[in-house]
Image (tube, grey):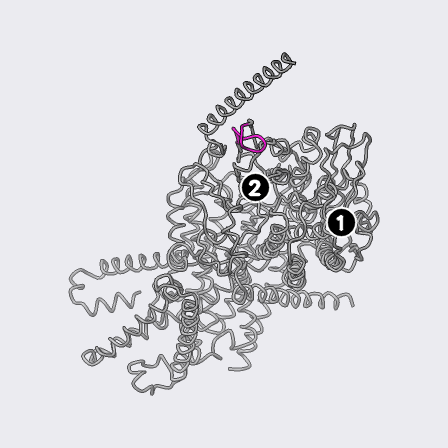
Amino acid sequence: MKIFDGIKGYFRNIYESVTTVSMGMWITFKTAFFERKVTLQYPSHDILEGKPKDASLSNKPNLNPPFEPLLGAGQQIYKGPLNTQLPERYRGLLGYDEPSCISCLLCALNCPIDVIRVKGVKIEGRKGKVPTTFRIDYSKCMFCGLCVEVCPTDAIFFTRQFEGATFEYRTLIREFISPKLSLERLQLAEEAKAKAREKKEEKEKSARETSHTE
Amino acid sequence: MENLVNDLFGQFTFLQKIGYVPTAAVVMLACALVVLNFFGLMSGLYTYLERKVAGWTNSRRGPNRVGPYGLLQFMADGVKLVLKEDIIPAAADRNIFKFAPYLLLLGTALSFVVIPFGPKWIISDLNIGILYLLATGSFTVIGLILAGWASNNKWALLGGMRSAAQIVSYEIPNALAILVVVLAAGTMSMQGIIRAQAGGVHHWFIFSSPFSLLAFFIYFISAIAEINRVPFDIPEAESELVAGYNIEYSAMRFGAFFAAEFGNIYVVSAVAVTCFLGGWQLPLLDDVNDLGPLGYGLGSFLSRSDVLMLLLLAALLTTFLAWKALSAFVWDVRRKRAFFGSRFVRYHSELLVLGLLFAGGAVSLALHLPLRPHLSTIYRLIFQYLVPFLVFFGKAMLLSFVILWWRWTLPRLRVDQLMGVCWKYLIPMGFFCLIGQGFWMWLFS
Amino acid sequence: MPLTTETMILNMGPHHPSTHGVLRFILRTDGEVIHMCRPDIGYLHRGLEKIAEQVPYAHFMPYTDRLDYLAAMNCNLGYAITVERAADIEVPLRAEYIRVLVAELNRIISHLISVGTFAMDMGAVTPFTHTLREREWVNDLFEELCGSRLTYNYIRFGGVAFDLPDGFLDRLSRFLDYFEPRLKQYNRFISKNKIFKERLIGVAVISTQQALDYALVGPNLRASGIDWDLRRDEPYSVYGEMEFDVPVGGSEFGELGDCYTRYWVRILEMEQSVRIIRQCIAKMPEGSYWNRSKKKLKVPAGEIYVRTEAPRGELGFFLVSQGGLRPHRLRIRTGSFSAMSIVEEVGSGLMVADLVALIASLDVVAPEVDR
């Protein structure tokens, strides 16, 4: 009877091969001709037919700041609908909002790989310290988001830009505060310091005088 | 081709002054040029089709950047391959390494000599045509072994050895399946085999007897194995042998391997069409000659039912295109797109072509009257050359699509299983078919 | 002249399509048959354990993403639980449910990659792109949840970084509704394919004793017939409240401990993960998602070993603290490493094509081996 089993197995093999192969072929055929293609053709955005996930997002100043591209040859910012289709928590290149920064150094301290470098001075008329240096090294950043999480004033945040490729490593290190502004602020700080010193001296003087009069 | 030379020689008297041999030489060269170009074009077309089918089955889009629908992609690829640096490994056997891909290419190109394109279109209708094809098919294995050996790379060597074992084994079921056809047709000439299947779809060898139906599948499977396609692509199994025999090749030599592989797909499909699917004959041929004005000059080629079927197909196609155009138009109107930015213009260039065709038809109708005396010649040319070619080509394309489709559906076999399929299943079944066909013919004729 | 044959040394990798990352195998083969197979690891060594000693506890979280990049959530979870147990941090209930949800979701997409690459190593490319297509959807969900698609850095000590966005659970259940029929389609498409089965059944069998000897973990262990799953046997987070089965290899699919069983156990695990996620969605409580403390985290001196069930099996963190801001030593035990070590014993005697199947079925991820 063993030989019959063998013969049965032989024909069962043929039967199984034919049925399972045709089943697979039907599935690929279905995928090829009756199912939606999932490709998003990235730079040519006219293929994307869907509405942006949140149309108002593109107008939110906080999410799409006036953020110039990294300085590289032939750099372009992608402005298609993909940006507006990205979710709100999307982690793009880091953005920086100078006016609200208080140079508390929390972002720099919380960065595991020292991507951010901040220096700040105290000048009059602004809360906290004023940054004189704010440098992000995009080549090292791993987009973990720890800096964004700890920032108390939302001065550092994720933008929706994701095209960071350049031809030069140097262009990935970005200074957010121009040397001119930085110098101005340092001078202001010096002046403020001087003024404060003067004030202090005056105060001390007057105190001394009052003490003398007393 | 002898017919062509003789025709020309008889028709144009000035050729007799030149002499028979130079005329024949020139005609031969011209034919070779045409066929080689056809071969190149087919390989290109298949690279495009392969990538398109791959894309579709993978729910991607496939190439769509170069040219309309990405049709010129193969040209871009070819230009790239030609411009690339041709690297020859220092330790390779230089001469053999350089020669191997062309041997492969030669085998494929030689096969095109006996492949028919129409009742009168064949380079050489050898009386041993199919045997010749089996012989040229064996060039492949020599090329692959040489490539694997000369590369001086262990993976390439493994690939070459695998291909040797595989192709030599699979030639046996291949030949057995073809023997069934030869038995049924009583001839080995390619045109003879096609003519033996005249008289409608039930005379085609695939449907004429159960044994030849089985033989068709045996032929198809073993032929796929012989051209190293999935599920039998173990010589170049990319996940095991990286790239197999062509691992060290680059630039156009690499391209030559692929030109040969893709050319081989056409050869295999064409042979299957010739042997089993009635070649260039339409499916419903019967002897109805009275076709009215439409069939003027059609001769014995087309039947009324064929014309009806063609009309039906044309109607279906027109409906489909009209539906697509309408939906695109609606899409545009809804989104208020400008004319040149609209879907209608961007994605339906084929509608413009169709419009041009209709315009051409109208013009030709207008020109109908003055051309009346020559009409029969024109129709004869169309229906003796163009239509059979399209029929043959369409059938071959359908089979090629199945080959590509398998490539993107199935996993690949292991070496020992591959041999098992050949020796345990295909060869016994091949012998069974051969004997069965003999009995069938003895019973029914 | 007598005909002689000799064995040859074959270098498989580090640049080989089926070594999943950067691995190298030194093979001594006689033609196609392997006589010796020695894995050579270390190409992706980044010194993660040393880095852990250099940075504060919280800063190591993004590095665990890179430990096993296909299952970043599970690695995050393992590390977070280790530190929480060492420093005695409370986790809100909602955060626990969210953690289990994302961990199981990540297990699904990790197994999808495993199944897809398995099919690709067997020569079928289409299943791979089909599984990636489903994975894209989950990636979109994760992107919505935490802003990132691969290296999530989502779980924090004492909770998770973000609450679930509005309508997230609806979109997730829509994905699950879509995914379950798809899983059945994969079975029709590739799992039941005759060629695929022939290639895998009875190939590279790892016996129960061998699996124990080499300390295999996770699906590889269960495929060899040992009913052991940390989610059920040593429940962490809220796994104790979940109802699920642990698929164990048996004779009903292939031979015990062969490549096909390892493949099939993963398919079944995906079904169970879907079950767990559905329960999470149903039970998801309201409340705080992060018990956030503003103080700098200091772990009291001592040592602790915590193990969790990652897609590639037991993921253990051994933490030695001397009471500072940084760990004194952090040792990571990963499933891929022990899976790698068994290749040498099981691999000899196979054919080259079977070795590819063995590596793919063990689901080795190179960065997890080298760390």
Whether residues under marks 2 and 1 lie with C-beta atoms below 8 angstroms apart, the answer is: no
Residue situated furthest right in the rendering: C233
Residue A131 in magenta stretch: yes
Split into 4 quadrants, where in the image is the N terminus of chain C? top right
Res. B179 visible in picture: yes
Residue, disc 2? A157
Name which residue type carries label 2: Phe
Callout 2: residue from which chain?
A
State the SS at label 1: helix
Name which residue type carries label 1: Glu
Give the magenta-colored segment's residue range: A123-134
Callout 1: residue from which chain?
C
Judge the density around disc 2: few (<14), some (14-19), many (≥20) Cα neighbours within 10 Å: many
Residue C220 screen position, x and y as percent: 75, 48
Which disc, if any, is residue C96?
Answer: 1
Query: In this rendering, do the residues under marks 2 and 1 share a single chain?
Result: no
Residue situated furthest top in the rendering: A212
User: Relative to A143, is A25 above or below?
Assistant: below
